[in-house]
Amino acid sequence: MSPKLITDILIVGAGPAGLSAARSAAETGLSVLVLEKSLEVGYPIHTSGGSWTRELREFGIPEHFLHLIHEHEFISSNSRAAFHYGFPEICVIDIRGVYQHLAVQASLAGAEILTNTLVKEPLIEQGKLCGARAVRNGQQLEVRAKLVIDASGLGAVLGRPLGLSRKVESFGNGAEYELIAPNWQQDKTVILLGSGYLPTGYAWVIPCGGQRVRVGFGVISPQCRANPLELLERFIRGGSETARQLQPVSIIETHLGSVPNSGYAEKTFADNLLIAGDSAGQVLGIAGEGIRLALEIGRLAGETAARAIRKNNTSANFLQSYETAWKKRFARSIEINARMNAILRNYSDAQWDKAVNILKDVDPAVVVALMKGYFDLNLVKLILTKNPGLFTYNAMKIIRKAITDRLQ
């Protein structure tokens, strides 16, 4: 007979969304169990770790996990635009350190975390979700819960079988090396654009401290069939100015990962179920970044789950408040990111050169706001204040129209 566990809230996935949900739910005194398929929280690494200093500080991420950046540069085939930030708006996180910090915080709040536990399928009885079946340390495991949060990532191991998470039509497919690169400036990040580097998507060079640098290539799949690891290897061994600055090359880690970028799931709740993070497509697709969203939306999922159990009402009707809340905050930005991503992935070298040339005259604060991907009225006001001429360009016209249409 398979071992059985019982908990108030079951969370699948110990990434930022799952751990944020676990902490907020456990703080209410309910029993919370997190199941993670990997052997350890935060590894293997599937993300570059590039993020934003202000937001992560607001979430209480300790300073020693943040590597601060003051210089940022875009490089295309025939153009480049560089920016300096007195305040380090950009940061690069110690991924394993941050994830394990979140795990510690969730555990101290009362959540239990089990690694090496692969959730296989939802547990359904009398037509209702009541937990999940998993394999842990090679043994079958059955977990019963009053409510389940699927934060399992791109696979959406519970949401998809239950019809909530649609098939991902487009996703970022990335490969990254972590190098020892003593000659690279440790407070400078670079984004590489154009066919001289990769057919779609973008490449990045981001230092992470201790003379380490993460160099990665991300392509849009399945539209682009190029292997990002092959593109990365060719770049590292090539003779471009950026590649030369990384020499001599010593590769100490290889990271592979995928992130959805075709928009969010149409429905993120059902009886006894919430989905959050990559499982729900809650990702800002232009940069392929979801950590900030995962922390905030995960917390919201945990709070909603705890409230539902306290009210003894885990019906879809009650849980709908979760979707209403996160969509109010993020849906517009995710939608615009997906639309812009569909446009940018078809850019020619000439278009990238033009875009980078335009950026040369853009205020650094506007550049950061655009990179963050929060497309809302605050962005419109910032652009109108700093660079109103931006709205004469086609891409920005699309953004402005999408923002203002939603506000009417």
Image (cartoon, helix red, strand yellow):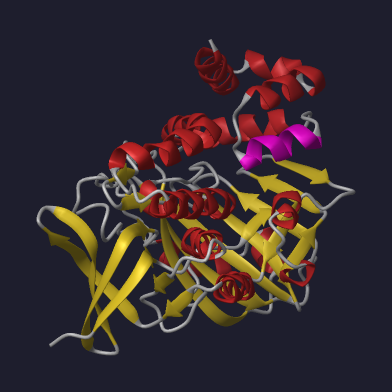
Direction front: furthest residue: 311
Is any atom of residue 334 visible in this view?
Answer: no
On the rendered structure, is 224 left or right of 23? left
Of 74 and 101, which appears nearest the observer? 101
Q: Where the N terminus falls, by quadrant?
A: bottom left
Of 94 and 248, which appears nearest the observer? 94
Of 196 and 149, which appears nearest the observer? 149
Is any atom of residue 228 visible in this view?
Answer: yes
The quadrant where residue 343 appears: top left
The x and y percentages for residue 68 are: 79, 61
Q: Is residue 97 above or below residue 219?
A: below
Taking the magenta stretch, the answer to whether it contains residue 13 is no
Q: Is residue 135 above or below residue 352?
A: below
Magenta segment's dominant SS is: helix
Q: Is residue 66 above or below residue 116?
A: above
The structure residue drawn at horizontal position 39% and vertical position 74%, both measured from the top left corner, is 36
The x and y percentages for residue 70 are: 83, 54
On the rendered structure, is 8 left or right of 73? left
- The magenta segment is 364-372
The structure residue drawn at horizontal position 52% and vertical position 66%, both measured from the top left corner, is 29
The x and y percentages for residue 296 are: 57, 49
The quadrant where residue 248 appears: bottom right
The structure residue drawn at horizontal position 41% and vertical position 53%, both measured from the top left corner, is 278
Of 166 and 151, which appears nearest the observer? 151
The structure residue drawn at horizontal position 9% and vertical position 56%, both measured from the top left corner, is 126
